[in-house]
Image (tube, rainbow, N blue to C red):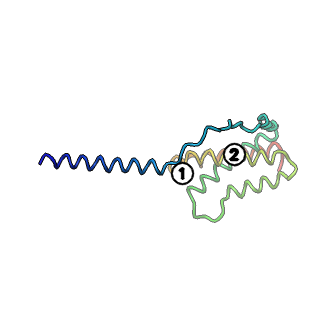
Amino acid sequence: MKSAPRLAIALVLATLGADIALAQQNTPAPRPAQRRARVPPAQPPVTPAPAPPPVTAQEKPLIELSEILGSLALAHQICTPGTSANPWRTRMETLIDAEGESSGAREKMIGAYNRGFSEYATSYRQCTDTLRAARRVLARDAARVARDLERRFGS
């Protein structure tokens, strides 16, 4: 019986040797060392993006209102998803149309709207009591800023 374990060990070693030999046959032969050093392509120096133009005193309340409208648009989208049109987005589109095409404030307002939308999107994924409370505060702030704009710049 002592020969049975020896036979098993010999069999395992033989199959291992065959597996190793087979693996060595399947590996490609090493290539001669003729590697060229890779030189990264020359890249132009990175120039920082131009700073956005400063916000004027007339634009500041429009920018603030745009950001609030963006936040309200997201809150409406989350808390009342079944409605057809988002009233806050519609109000923002009306505000942008009223500003005109040639105004530099237009891009700033769109950026502020998107910023307000995305800032709330990072915090809220579902309608909660906190988001409902934030909607009330934001609607109150939007009404205040709109009244201030009307008082300062007319109807």
For discs 1 and 2, the disc positioned in front in the rendered view: 1
Hey, what amino acid is under mark 1?
Arg
Counting residues from the N terminus, which is met first, the one under dot 1 or under dot 2? Answer: 2
- From the top left corner, tell me how far across and down residue 27 is, in percent: 49, 48
Which mark is drawn over residue 115?
none
- The relative height of residue 143 versus residue 47 in the rendered view (above or below) is below
Residue 2 percent location from the top left of the image = 13, 45
Residue 81: image quadrant is bottom right
In the picture of the structure, the residue carrying the numbered disc 1 is 125
| Residue drawn at 80 percent across, 41 percent down | 59
Residue 135 appears at what percent x and percent y? 59, 49
Q: Quadrant of residue 152?
A: top right
* Identity of the residue drawn at 54% across and 51% down: 125
155 relative position to 28: left or right: right
Label 1: which secondary element: loop
User: Is residue 127 left or right of 5 when viewed as pictured?
Assistant: right
Residue type, mark 2 in image: Glu
**The furthest residue to the right:** 102
SS of the residue at dot 2?
Answer: helix
What residue appears at the point 22 percent right and 49 percent down from the top-left corner?
Answer: 8
Residue to which mark 2 is pinned: 67
